[in-house]
Image (tube, helix red, strand yellow):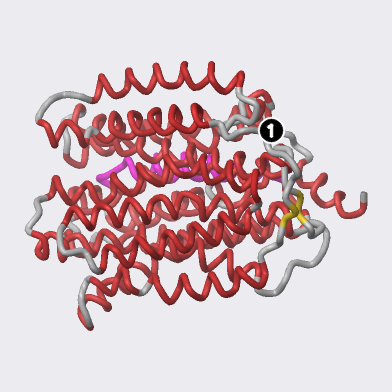
Amino acid sequence: MPTADRSPNATPPRRLMPALFIGVFMAALDTAVIAPAIPALREAFAIDHRDAALLMVVFILCSLCSTALLANLGDRHGRRPVYLGSVACFAAGSLLIALSPSFWMVLVGRAVQGIGAGGITPTASAVIGDAVAAQERGRALGLIGATYGMAFVLGPPLATLLMLAFSWHWIFLINLPIAALVLGLGASSLPRQSRAAWLPPLDRAGIVLAMLLLSCLVLGITRVADDLFGQPLWPGFLAAAALGLLLLLRVERHAAAPMIPLSLFANRQLALTYLLTAAAGFGMGSVIFLSSIAQLAHGVAPQHGGFVLLPLVLSSMLGSMGAGRLLNRLGARTLLLAGFGALATGYAMSAFTAAGLWFFLLASMPVGLGVGIVVGGALRSIAIDEAPPAQRGAAQGMINICTSVGTLLSAAVVSAVADFSGGGARGFGIAYLGVAATMLLMLPAALGLRHDRGAQLKAEPAA
């Protein structure tokens, strides 16, 4: 495996963190601006709601499928070319969308964007593990996590402003100068890695099986194929995903350099981390239905639904940045206990839909705080510390995959429970009690993490 030429205890270049921060922000911003752009895209290409849903499904599917591959390539050939290539791929997808003459070309552009996005965040996190000293990693990873909160604050108004001043095309064209800035900063600051004289063969079978597994999982959870073909296909996709998992486990056990190293799951700390990561994604994804409670229980107009979530988004930013600063002092276990406890409290309060709008706004704040903590730097920090340096990219890629799977599951489970419970505000209230219970169940899992992680990180430079 390649080795970094820069010591992790050395001071990283001044341009390194902006190159990573802006790149992750660009990918996160695109997730936030697609929702305001959907009405304009529907009008421009004469598509219905079912077709519009493909804009998110295609992006998520391609992002998930590319994450493990690009993380593996980063471990094999170095983070620098993978990160820069991912940013360039994302920019190419943005340009393709802006120039698309048809909706199907827009979907191709979203697919290219998703492939690029799959390599940006895990590679950026792995670079932090390679180049940033242990006592500074928490703050750096906290900033990476806070970019998502910033994107969801700035994204919708920025998209609206661009569409009012110009057209929907500029929502995607704006990514081009941002990507150019990231490429310029990254070219001069990303650590170069010396190439190994010999590399084991690429795990082609693992790549194919992992992509098929994730594709079937996404199609089974989102049920988008059911809508397209008018048939209940989701049970078949989930069964195929289960079969694909069994085949993948068998292939990866015998691969010389597995794309998804099973040794990561043999580490108890990493196995707990991935479980907690999926739960964190579940908690983060459950946020999307809170605006439905505001509309159904408190009479908030649909066009104002985004405004009632501002306390949540701001709390998420504060939680992510604060957790990054406190990581070395308190340790990952303490922060995750606080994060899942805040999520359980906030979602339980949100379930009381008859308490009034002000109580709802108050309840959204611990939800945002908990999301900021659990999807911030703590889980990624554990993955950096526990994974061998040659597998840091793969370990960070699994963080992204588990988060995405948890987010997809939350959308399916919350909506299904709400519908089964009668729909309306009462149905969502029951669903959010279930989400709160799920977050509480993560507290015993978090207790299984090492208690002295913060002390270990603080002691590392002196060792």
User: Looking at the image, which residue is at 24% across and 64% down?
Assistant: 36
Give the image location of residue 267, x and y in percent. Answer: 69, 27
- Residue located farthest toward the bottom when viewing the structure as drawn: 165
- Amino acid type of the residue that numbered disc 1 sits on in the rendered structure: Leu
Q: Is residue 308 magenta?
A: no
**Residue reaching furthest left?**
46
Quadrant containing the N terminus is top right
The residue depicted at 32 percent of the width and 22 percent of the height is 238
Front-most of residues 420 and 124: 124
For the point 63% across and 67% down, the residue is 17
Residue 349 included in the magenta stretch of the image: yes
Return the residue at label 1: 449
Q: Position of residue 300 (x, y in %)?
A: 19, 59
For the point 37% across and 23% down, the residue is 241
Residue 64: x percent and y percent? Answer: 42, 41
Q: Is residue 95 left or right of residue 257?
A: left
Q: Is residue 100 above or below residue 195?
A: below
Depth order, front residue of 293/126: 126
On the rendered structure, is 194 left or right of 263?
Answer: right
User: For the magenta stretch, what is the residue range?
Assistant: 331-354
- Image position, residue 171 (x, y; %): 29, 70
Image quadrant in which you'd find residue 358: bottom left
Q: Residues within 10 Å of mark 1 (few under 14, many from 20)?
A: many
